[in-house]
């Protein structure tokens, strides 16, 4: 069993930034990632709000740049999915699909997965007009017509944000009333650019090179229709990747991990950063900041133990 001072779970912006800070501090560090380093940002077509890239950068390229920088400083990356974590004294034992590892400190940065509808076009058009982040991609729809799918706070906030740029925003919800807080609902109802489509689900997303329309169905009448749009933003929920942690950590609302300002969890030596932590704003720059804080906190924990 290989032993490290720091093990990072998750290779998104939070995990990679934590890796940069930990290795630069001279700590033996392993990062475990089940997919591709870069995390969810790799599916973003273009990122314009990350400092240092005034012309913008593709999400995939940003993830690669972060990975390259982390590896340059000595970060070791293993492609493996974590199955479980066990505590043995002060050690954290990490069991994966590839091997077992132990560490003095653990930084959990596994992020969250976007809830999906499982409909035709959803996978094929991701990053081609289909997005899960209005804050990231909204400005690309200036004077265009996107749709938002959902009825909660995130969906309404996305529709309001998009209305700053777009000529019209369709808000598609499967019920006849919204789940969002009243103040957001009032703002949406008062916004002339937002057109609400009630009692409706999306059956398919149309488009070849990019999204050009939606196939809809009214859940009460069964009537089917098509809607021409230039893009679609999915806001039907997020699921933190924390199932394997429930036996050792007390999880917060929706499965997120509660932390303090130092990214410390309730267990000494275990930290959480990025979208997986409670209160995250789910932005790349914030995740990177979380990762830096978690790594600095891990270093302090090691020197004081």
Image (cartoon, grey):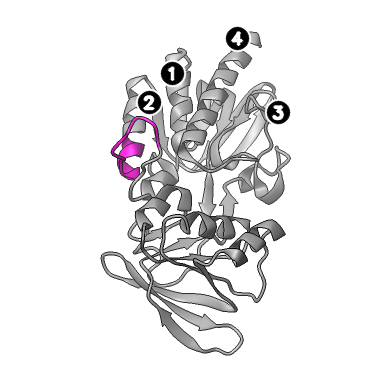
Single out the residue that lies furthest toward the left: 209
For the residues labelled 4 and 1, say whether their Cβ atoms are less than 8 Å apart. Answer: no
Range covered by the magenta-colored residues: 50-64
Q: Is residue 303 magenta?
A: no
Instruction: Identify the image quadrant of the C terminus.
Output: top right
For the residues labelled 3 and 4, say whether their Cβ atoms are less than 8 Å apart. Answer: no
Compared with 120, 116 (above or below) is: above
> Is label 2 in a helix, a strand or a loop?
helix
The crowd level at tag 4 (other Cα within 10 Å; few <14, some 14-19, many 20+) is: few
Of the two numbered discs 1 and 3 on the same chain, state the one appearing first in sequence.
Answer: 1
Q: Where residue 259 appears, x then y in whole percent? A: 67, 32
Q: CA distance from mark 2 to mark 1?
A: 8 Å
In the rendering, which numbered label is found on residue 303?
Answer: 4
Of the two numbered discs 3 and 4 on the same chain, state the one appearing first in sequence.
Answer: 3
> Is label 1 in a helix, a strand or a loop?
helix
Q: CA distance from mark 1 to mark 3?
A: 23 Å
Q: Residue at x 40, y 24 (%)?
A: 75
Compared with 8, 141 (above or below) is: below
Of the two numbered discs 2 and 1 on the same chain, state the one appearing first in sequence.
Answer: 1
Q: CA distance from mark 3 to mark 4?
A: 17 Å
Single out the residue that lies furthest toward the top: 303
Q: Residue at x 31, y 29 (%)?
A: 68
Q: Where residue 188 appears, x then y in whole percent? A: 59, 63
Q: Is residue 54 magenta?
A: yes
| In the image: residue 185, left or right of residue 225 | right
Residue at numbered disc 3: 267
Of the two numbered discs 4 and 1 on the same chain, state the one appearing first in sequence.
Answer: 1
In the rendering, which numbered label is found on residue 23?
Answer: 1
Pick whichever, 10 or 256, lies toward us: 256
Kindly tell me whether residue 1 is visible in this rendering: no
Q: CA distance from mark 4 to mark 1?
A: 15 Å
Of the two numbered discs 2 and 3 on the same chain, state the one appearing first in sequence.
Answer: 2
């Amino acid at each position: 069993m290989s032993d490290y001072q720091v093990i990072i779970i998750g290779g998104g912006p939070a995990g990679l930034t934590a890796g940069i800070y930990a290795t630069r501090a001279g700590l033996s560090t392993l990062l475990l990632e089940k997919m591709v380093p870069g995390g969810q940002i790799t599916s973003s077509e273009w990122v314009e709000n990350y400092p240092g890239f005034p012309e913008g950068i593709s999400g995939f390229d940003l993830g690669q740049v972060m990975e390259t920088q982390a590896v340059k400083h000595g970060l070791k990356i293993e492609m493996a999915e974590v199955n479980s974590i066990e505590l043995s004294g002060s050690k954290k034992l990490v069991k994966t699909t590839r091997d077992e590892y132990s560490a003095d400190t653990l930084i959990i940065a596994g992020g969250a997965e976007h809830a999906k509808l499982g409909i035709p076009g959803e996978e094929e058009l991701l990053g081609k007009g289909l997005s899960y982040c209005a804050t990231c991609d909204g400005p690309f729809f200036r004077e265009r017509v996107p749709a938002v799918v959902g009825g909660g706070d995130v969906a309404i906030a996305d529709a309001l944000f998009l209305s700053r740029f777009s000529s019209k925003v369709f808000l598609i919800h499967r019920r006849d009333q919204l789940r969002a807080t009243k103040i957001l609902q009032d703002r949406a109802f008062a916004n002339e650019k937002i057109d609400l489509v009630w009692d409706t689900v999306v059956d398919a997303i149309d488009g070849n090179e990019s999204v050009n329309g939606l196939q809809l169905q009214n859940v009460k009448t069964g009537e089917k229709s098509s809607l021409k749009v230039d893009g679609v933003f999915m806001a039907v929920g997020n699921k933190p990747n924390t199932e394997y942690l429930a036996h050792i950590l007390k999880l917060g609302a929706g499965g997120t991990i509660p932390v303090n300002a130092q990214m410390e969890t309730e267990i000494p030596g275990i930290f959480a950063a990025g979208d997986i932590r409670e209160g995250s704003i789910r932005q790349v720059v914030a995740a990177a900041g979380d990762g830096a804080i978690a790594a600095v906190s891990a270093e302090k924990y090691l020197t004081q133990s």
